[in-house]
């Protein structure tokens, strides 16, 4: 058996290993595990985002409370002024000052009302965020319990399948030793950008990309000591 034929059989064994690995990665149990894992990660990210927003809102509440305190002090001073003017006689009253005092009082009161609305809205948002975090945590606990149970089930599945995969890999490693290093190196290089690096040349057509090649390629494959590759897809060509 020539080296290219051995390489072809090596590729068949390599494909079998990949098929077995793919089956192990696509079992219903593993798919559920991956889905739960993604949910848990997404939930952790969401909780971190909500907690970060909550800190910002708490800082905003603190600023608003400081502003509200200052406005209440201003309102108290304005009320004292109003009390003073209410005790003055008509000849002591300045109409413009009184009008300005009333305007300032109304403006300060409106500002306090506006701040209270902002505070109420932000507190509702914070409560909503807290509720969302609690609900997410409950769902995460349930998901984690389900994940742990499925993990045990998946490990049992792997115990039965990993033995077969191990045998296939051992067979592949043994076959690799029978192939010249130059062919194995080229095979692995091509596999980096093409599936199934070895293709059969039949009727001057590459079995990998189906490209029609010059008639002299078949003769080159038969006579060359080095691997001949398809000029279109780059796969190693063999004759059957």
Image (cartoon, rainbow, N blue to C red):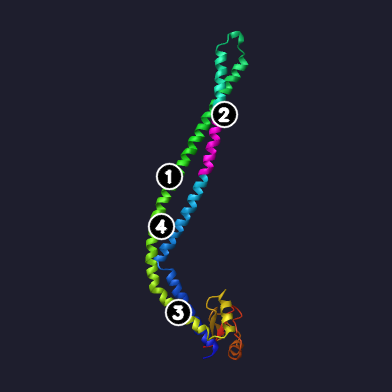
Q: Find residue 109 and report its horizontal and vertical position in percent.
A: 53, 26
Q: Which label's residue is closer to the chain start, 4 or 3? A: 4
Please say whether residue 211 is visible from this viewpoint. no
> Which of pointers 1 and 3 lies earlier in the amino acid sequence?
1
Q: Are marks 2 and 4 in contact (CB under 8 Å)?
A: no
Residue under label 4: 144
Which region of the structure is painted magenta? 54-68
Label 2 packing within 10 angstroms: few (<14), some (14-19), many (20+): few
Q: Are marks 4 and 3 in contact (CB under 8 Å)?
A: no
Q: Along the polypeptide, which appears first: circle 2 or circle 3?
A: 2
- Give the spatial CA distance, label 1 vs label 4: 20 Å
Asked if the residue at tag 4 contacts the one at tag 1, i.e. Cβ–Cβ closer than 8 Å, the answer is no
Report crowding for label 3: few under 14, some 14 to 19, many 20 or more residues within 10 A (C-alpha): some
Q: Residue sitting at 42 percent across and 54 percent down? A: 140
Labelled disc at residue 131: 1
Residue 150: in magenta span:
no
Q: Residues at badges 2 and 3 in contact (C-beta under 8 Å)?
A: no
Task: Assign the magenta stretch its main secondary structure.
Answer: helix
Find residue 21 and report its horizontal and vertical position in percent. 45, 73
Please say if 114 is above or below 200.
above
Answer with mark 1 or mark 4, whichever residue precedes in sequence: 1
Q: Position of residue 102 (x, y in %)?
A: 57, 20
Q: Are marks 1 and 3 in contact (CB under 8 Å)?
A: no
Q: Report helix, strand or loop for mark 4.
A: helix
Q: Which residue is mark 3?
A: 168
As measured in the structure, the alpha-carbon distance from the residue carrying label 1 to the one carrying label 3 is 52 Å
Residue 70 tag number: 2
User: Rounded to the nearest whole Å, what is the CA distance between mark 2 and mark 1?
Assistant: 32 Å
């Amino acid at each position: 058996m020539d080296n290219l034929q051995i390489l072809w059989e090596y590729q068949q064994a390599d494909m079998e290993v990949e098929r077995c690995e793919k089956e192990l990665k696509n079992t219903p149990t593993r798919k559920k595990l991956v889905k739960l894992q993604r949910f848990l990660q997404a939930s952790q990210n969401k909780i971190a985002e909500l907690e970060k927003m909550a800190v910002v809102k708490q800082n905003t509440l603190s600023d608003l409370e400081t502003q509200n305190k200052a406005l209440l002090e201003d309102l108290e001073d304005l009320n004292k002024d109003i009390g003073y003017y209410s005790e003055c006689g008509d000849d002591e009253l300045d109409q413009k000052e009184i009008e300005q005092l009333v305007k300032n009082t109304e403006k300060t009161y409106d500002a306090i009302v506006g701040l209270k609305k902002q505070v109420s809205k932000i507190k509702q948002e914070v409560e909503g965020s807290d509720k969302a975090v609690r609900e997410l945590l409950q769902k995460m606990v349930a998901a984690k319990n389900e994940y742990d149970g499925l993990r045990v089930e998946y490990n049992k599945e792997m115990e039965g399948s990993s033995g077969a995969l191990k045998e296939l890999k051992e067979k592949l490693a043994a076959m690799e030793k029978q192939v010249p290093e130059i062919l194995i190196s080229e095979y692995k290089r091509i596999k980096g950008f093409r599936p199934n690096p070895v293709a059969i040349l039949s009727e001057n057509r590459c079995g990998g990309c189906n490209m029609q090649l010059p008639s002299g390629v078949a003769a080159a494959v038969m006579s060359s000591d080095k691997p001949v590759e398809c000029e279109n897809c780059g796969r190693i060509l063999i004759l059957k």
